[in-house]
Every structure is written in structure tokens, then in C-alpha cells.
Image (spheres, rainbow, N blue to C red):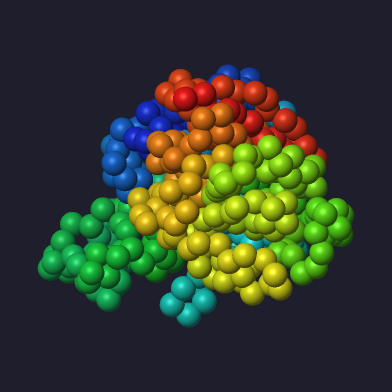
Amino acid sequence: MIGSIQISVLCGEERGGWINPGLAMSLLAWSHDPKRTRAIEVVPAHGFHTSQEARNYVTDRFLRSSHGWLLLVDNDTRPERDGCCINLPAMADLNRPIVAAAIPVLNHGQLYVNCYFEHGDTYRTPILEDFRKAAENGLVACDAVGSGAVLLRRDVLEQLAAAGASTVAIAECPYLPNLLGATVPVWLRPRDAFGRTQIGEDLYLCRRAKRLGFSVHSSLEHLCGHLHTVDQGMIPEIQTGREPEWAAADYGLTDPIPAITPWAITPGMAARLRAAVAAVPSGQTVMELGSGISTCVLASAGARLISVEHDEEYARALGNLNGWPTPLVKPLENGWYNDRGLPGLKSQIGLLFVDGPPGDTAPLARYPALPRLHEHLAPGATIILDDAHRPDEREILDRWLREFPVRLEAVETFEHGRQMAILKWAA
């Protein structure tokens, strides 16, 4: 079975074994592909507290088998395009020591790819367009890859396991006692003397493998979507950009306004927020979680506004724009805003707009909005959940409807398929 593949789906304990439906369908397709030339064994990994523990578990299982390749796939990876499964096991035909499916990451309005190049003491990532230009036969040689979907050849893992601490620099892991004589796991997350993570175990495995002479590649031919970075179906829309499409006037605003990024509200959504503000009784507060163009829209509509933002730099930049309010900075603590001492909550909230934290900061990142703030909602208050088209927000909506006295009035669709869920507080 030297050419066979062990496929392991890594499921964090916070999702209770959930995997992306697109990934589940792909697993079935790979296993029943009549053209398949390699045997496949699926070994799931769920219930582990950390990804490092899960990866070491499946790697140990793999090394005790006779398989030639280990394919690790995160449970929120979506290996499909245009309704067709992307054949990740076929990456073995490339016969590269480490090869990962390219996964786009959206950051500050720009698409990057989860492959990394050493840049001093840290790493840099290429934008998708530069990544495409650098690809040769669909592959980009790099220093490290993220492990959303990565295939590792057997000799890489065997040599890492045998080399142990010899691939680890003491300066990278000063917290490990007696490092030179220690048994070092294949997947190791380096931390400094204070226990702070320096880089993830996926990047560190690549760094150690390169020290042993192995190459690392990212495959553009196997471009996948990802629940917490960007769904592959959004790539054409994001690449075309929205900046040329809309301007301040389309939002009923005057310049300057924040940059119109792919995750900014659309003009149709802005009109819906204005209508919601108009329905808020006098004296009640409008609270917004996550700031941006919506902050300008709510303020210009006459809202008695509290805007909460976790990113201090972004909040300061918004406040420096002429005439717009500065959001209240509340850094994230355990996945939620540090909401101690929020001002203005002596008056009840008549409109709660939930557009933060960003979905990639935690699983079901926006769920705590009602558990934390429901006591401050006025009877009949309106709650608007943005991005209701996304799987996490759909699950959040389902849980809110089960756990709180809220009534779903509508799920409204706007430009580019964006959706908002409109709820009423019935308490």
C-alpha cells in the first residue's frame, strides 16, 4: 500500500464532529471514484482540545500503517468548484514531499494565498494575482504552507519523527526542558519563554522539513474554498472589487467615507438600516457591533449610536474621517468584545446591528451578541444579523430562535447575494 493515502479530517471539539457539507460530499466522491488508482483510508480526528494534538494523533496512526501519503484536511475546507469536487488525493501524483491546496484568505480587501515566504524573522504571503503569476505548471515553491488541505509524503514524516530535536532550534522553543534529549512530536507549536505562540505548528513543520532538505509547494490547480477565510465562489466577485461600482452618494453619504471593501454593507443594506433607525422610538439606543460604512449610515440617519469595534487602528482611522463618530474600542477577550462598562446602556437598545466580530475570529463568532446584550433590549427591539447567507450565521440564527424570545421577521437579500436576518425581540 506504499502508494495509498490516509485521509484525516481534523474537527475541533467546538464543532462536535461537524464538517463542511462540501467536504463530506468530496470524501464520498474520492472514495467511490471509479478512476481512482490509489487506495484510500479515511481516519477522522475529532474531540481533541488542540489542532496540534489532533495532527499528532493521525500522524502517529499513519506512521504505524503502510500508507504512502497523509492528506490532512480541516473540517471547514470546501474542496469543490462550480459544483464539482476538487480531487485532492490526486496531489499525490505530483510526487512532492509537501504540497498544499491553495486557499485564498481575504484581508483588508485583498486576496492572499495561504503559502508563506520567509521574511526576516516572520513570513509574508503573496496576493492571489502574484501567486498565479509565480506558478509553474500550477505549483508555487515556497517556504511554508497552511494546513487547510495538505498532503505529506511518508518519508517527510518518518524523517521528522526520527530527527526529533535536531530540527528544532533552542531559541525557537526555550520552554522545552532539556531540548537536545527530548522526544519532540512531529507537529510542534513553538512558543517563547512566556508561553506565547510564535508560529503555528503547520508553518513550523514546514520549516523543520526544509532543514532536512525537503521542498514545499502550494498547488493552484487544487484551489479550495474555506469557511473562515473565503468561500471559493466569492473569488471572482472579490477580484473584480466593489470600489469602482459604488461611491459615497450610493449610500446617501458625502465623502470622506471608509474604503468600500468586499465585506462592507451594500447600498441596499444601507437603505434597510436607515429604515430600521427611523422605526426606533425616541430615546432608545442603536448599538452596532463591528464598524465601517454602516457606522456612517447609522449616524447620518440620526441614530443615538454606540458603535463597538475590536480593532483600535481601524476605529481610530474611522474617527479621523471628517465628521464621523469614533467607535468605542473593545478588544476581543475569549472571542468576544470586552463589554465591561459600555456607556449608554442605561437607555434600552431599540436596534441592535450585529456585524461583528469578524467570522474568522472564533466559531459562531457573533452568537454571544444576544446572551451578552439581551437584558438591555427594549420590548419589540429590532435585531439585524448581517451575513445571514453564511453557514455560521445561519447556525447562530437557529440557536437564537431556539434559546431566546425572538421572532424572525425576514431574511432579506441584497446586492451580490448578501443577506440580513431581521428579528424582533418579543420579551
Residue 218 lies, in percent from the top left, at 59, 55
Residue at 68%, 27% (x, y): give it.
Answer: 411
Q: Nearer the viewer, residue 179 or 389?
A: 389
Q: Nearer the viewer, residue 107 or 382?
A: 382
Report whether 221 appears left or right of 23.
right
Residue 274 appears in the figure: yes
Report whether 177 appears left or right of 261.
left
Report whether 378 appears left or right of 332.
right
Residue 321 lies, in percent from the top left, at 69, 72
Residue 200 lies, in percent from the top left, at 39, 58
Residue 208 appears in the figure: no
Residue at 31%, 53% (x, y): give it.
Answer: 186
Residue 353 lies, in percent from the top left, at 59, 43
Residue 80 drawn above or below residue 355:
above
Q: Which quadrant would residue 210 be assigned to in this image? A: bottom left
Report whether 250 appears left or right of 154.
right
Residue 382 drawn above or below residue 330:
above
Placement of the N terminus among the 4 image quadrants: top left
Residue 378 drawn above or below residue 216:
above
Residue at 33%, 63% (x, y): give it.
Answer: 197
Residue at 50%, 62% (x, y): give it.
Answer: 328
